[in-house]
């Protein structure tokens, strides 16, 4: 029913049940994991009105497990990505897995816990600070690099107006080829970059 993908690792669908409506997956060597994706495998959907609350469990000094709420998945939102790197050393919240059985964990092993709860209960929860991975920054970085790469690539083929006139005067050139002034490309690059910086999702409208 559930699965996780830790950054740089294979898919893990080895789900274990801690109690009724409570499930968990083991995350070995969790200190090296920056992000994790939690998803529904599609084999068993949630019942209407229910969803899965996602928790990060880290071994506590007293030998127990402390938990922090990350977010949720549902039939309408079958996957979610969370940032773990800044969660492990912080204070964690209350235990949503009272009565659950997890066994003994190594000091570097964490758990991704999932509790089946009503949608209304889940909506009222507050995710841990810094847990939700931001996609805007990565998107901006990708777009910026793509624009720069395109501009540099196109610029490498730039020729001056006099060069074109000379080739044509000598009977060379290809009449089917269209030339675009570099100023036009530069203007487009500047406008697009500014819009991306001020409104990253402008392209959706």
Image: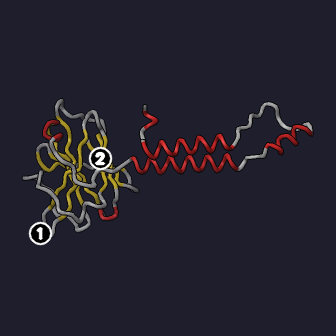
Residue occupying image coordinates x 26% and y 34% = 75
169 vs 94, nearest the viewer: 169
120 vs 199, nearest the viewer: 199
Callout 2: few (<14), some (14-19), or many (20+) C-alpha neighbours within 10 Å? many
Residue occupying image coordinates x 20% and y 38% = 51
Residue occupying image coordinates x 27% and y 50% = 14
The residue pinned by badge 2 equals: 38
Residue occupying the far right of the picture: 170
Q: Quadrant of the N terminus?
A: top left
Residue occupying image coordinates x 82% and y 31% = 175
The residue pinned by badge 1 equals: 62
Q: Position of residue 77 (x, y in %)?
A: 29, 37
Position of residue 66 relative to residue 173, above or below, is below
Which secondary structure lies at badge 2? strand
Query: Is 137 positioned to the left or the right of 24 in the image?
Result: right
Residue occupying the far left of the picture: 99
Q: Position of residue 104 (x, y in %)?
A: 16, 64
102 vs 181, nearest the viewer: 181
Position of residue 103 relative to residue 178, above or below, is below
Cβ atoms under marks 2 and 1 closer than 8 Å? no
136 vs 61, nearest the viewer: 136
Q: Splitting the image into 4 quarters, where does residue 21 fall?
A: top left
């Amino acid at each position: 029913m559930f699965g996780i993908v830790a950054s740089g690792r294979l898919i893990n669908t080895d789900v274990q049940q801690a109690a009724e409506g409570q499930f968990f997956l083991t995350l070995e060597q969790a200190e090296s994991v920056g992000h994790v994706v939690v998803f529904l495998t599609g084999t068993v959907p949630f019942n209407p009105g229910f969803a899965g609350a996602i928790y990060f469990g880290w071994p506590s000094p007293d030998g127990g497990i402390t938990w922090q709420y990350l977010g949720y998945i549902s039939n309408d939102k079958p996957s979610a990505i969370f940032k773990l790197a800044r969660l492990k050393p912080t204070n964690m919240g209350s235990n949503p897995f009272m009565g659950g059985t997890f066994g003994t964990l190594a000091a570097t092993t964490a758990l991704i816990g999932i509790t089946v709860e009503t949608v209304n209960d889940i909506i009222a929860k507050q995710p841990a600070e810094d847990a939700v991975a931001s996609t805007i920054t990565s998107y901006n970085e990708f777009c910026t690099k793509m624009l720069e790469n395109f501009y540099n690539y196109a610029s490498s083929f730039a020729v001056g107006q006099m060069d074109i006139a000379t080739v044509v005067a000598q009977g060379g050139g290809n009449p089917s080829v269209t030339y675009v002034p570099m100023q036009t490309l530069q203007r487009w690059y500047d406008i697009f970059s500014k819009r991306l910086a001020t409104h990253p999702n402008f392209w959706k409208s």
